[in-house]
Amino acid sequence: MPGPKDLDPSSSPRALLGAELRHAREKAGLSQEDLGGRLFVSGSFIGQLESGTRRMQPEYARLLDEALGTEDFFQRNCAASAKSKYPEHFAEAAEAEATAKEIREYAPLLIPGLLQTPAYTRAVCRAYQPTAPDAVIEALVAARMDRTRLLDDPTGPLLWVVLDEAALRRVTGGREVMAEALGHIVGLVRQSRIIVQVLPFDAGAHAAMEGAIKLMDFEGAPSLAYFEGVGTGRLEDDPATVRYQRQTFDLLSACALSPQNSLALVETMAHDYSHEENP
């Protein structure tokens, strides 16, 4: 397994905690696999904690203090590293996303967060929380827009998205909002910033009819799959699980329209929405 990257401890509480974990583990003469065995997790999980790919949860902080003889150091400092502007069930995935080199995602029901516009995000968040104060909704919109800044950097992650046709035809926020949202996707494709394919209705039954797919690959760290439901989510690093999700994504990509034909379809739908026709 590749060794953990050198970290700048001043960059974030999570980076500091990861650096201290690596120092304590090496001082104890343990490999990542050795320490993982004591916590009943994989060695790659320990490596992700050390590299800052995953954040430390309180239950693991307690076990690390016990395994490494660090008194209550990790428990005391865990809270600072766990602070996030994202919903609790998604916070760890958002932090991993920010360090990924490649992201592959299948979206069956809505445009993925990294491709959303503020108006589209606002409509989605309001649908999720119909009675929330406007300030709460705007905070969620701001956090999601912060995520999209990953795409501002031309050297940022490869983003390959397979969009189900259903996500494009569900009128979220109104036709004007949809026209803007699809136009935004078209712009990113034409800037060669993302790869987008559309899985059309006439593709019929497919390998991911039970849900969404999100895969993240990293430099020097194991790949992760993210599973999300209503108000819940979890990261998975089990190699067999990640491999199965990758195979499923590949099957979807093979069934979807080509990138060129997908772009033509999204452009046509954006035009139809903007002219208030029935797409």
Image: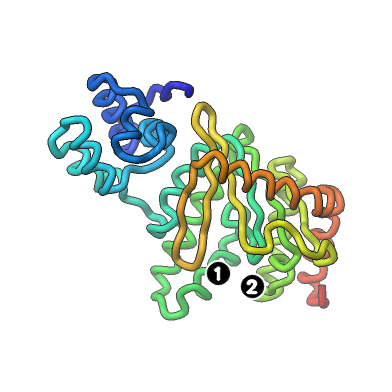
Q: Amino acid at mark 1?
A: Val
> Contact (CB < 8 A) between labels 2 and 1?
yes
Picture residue at 45% right of the left edge, 66% below the top: 231
Task: Identify which residue is drawn at 77% across, 58% down.
Answer: 199
Q: Is residue 26 left or right of residue 270?
A: left
**Which residue ends up furthest to the bottom in the rendered image?**
131
Position of the C terminus by quadrant:
bottom right
Describe the element under mark 1 as helix, strand or loop.
Answer: helix
Residue 70 picture quarter: top left
Relative to 248, 128 lies left or right: left
Look at mark 1 in the image and give the residue it sits on: 124
Which amino acid type is marked by label 2? Thr
| Crowdedness near tag 2: few (<14), some (14–19) or many (≥20) residues, C-alpha within 10 Å | many
Q: Say above or below: 271 vs 218.
A: below
Q: CA distance from mark 2 to mark 1?
A: 7 Å
Q: Secondary structure at mark 2?
A: loop
Q: Position of residue 192 (x, y in %)?
A: 74, 40
Report the residue at 65% width, 59% height from top: 107
Residue that carries the numbered disc 2 in the rendered image = 172
Q: Is residue 33 above or below residue 163?
A: above
Report x, y in % for residue 175.
Answer: 71, 74
Q: Residues within 10 Å of mark 1 (few under 14, many from 20)?
A: some
Earlier sequence position, callout 2 versus callout 1: 1
> Residue 117 occupies which quadrant of the picture?
bottom right
Whole-percent x and y of residue 31? 34, 23
Which residue: 32% across, 43% down? 56
Image quarter of residue 276:
bottom right
Whether residue 96 is situated above or below residue 229 in the rendered picture: above
Considering depth in this image, is 104 or 242 the residue closer to the camera?
242
Answer with left or right where residue 229 lies relative to residue 181. left
Q: Which residue sits furthest left?
A: 71
Label placed on residue 151? none
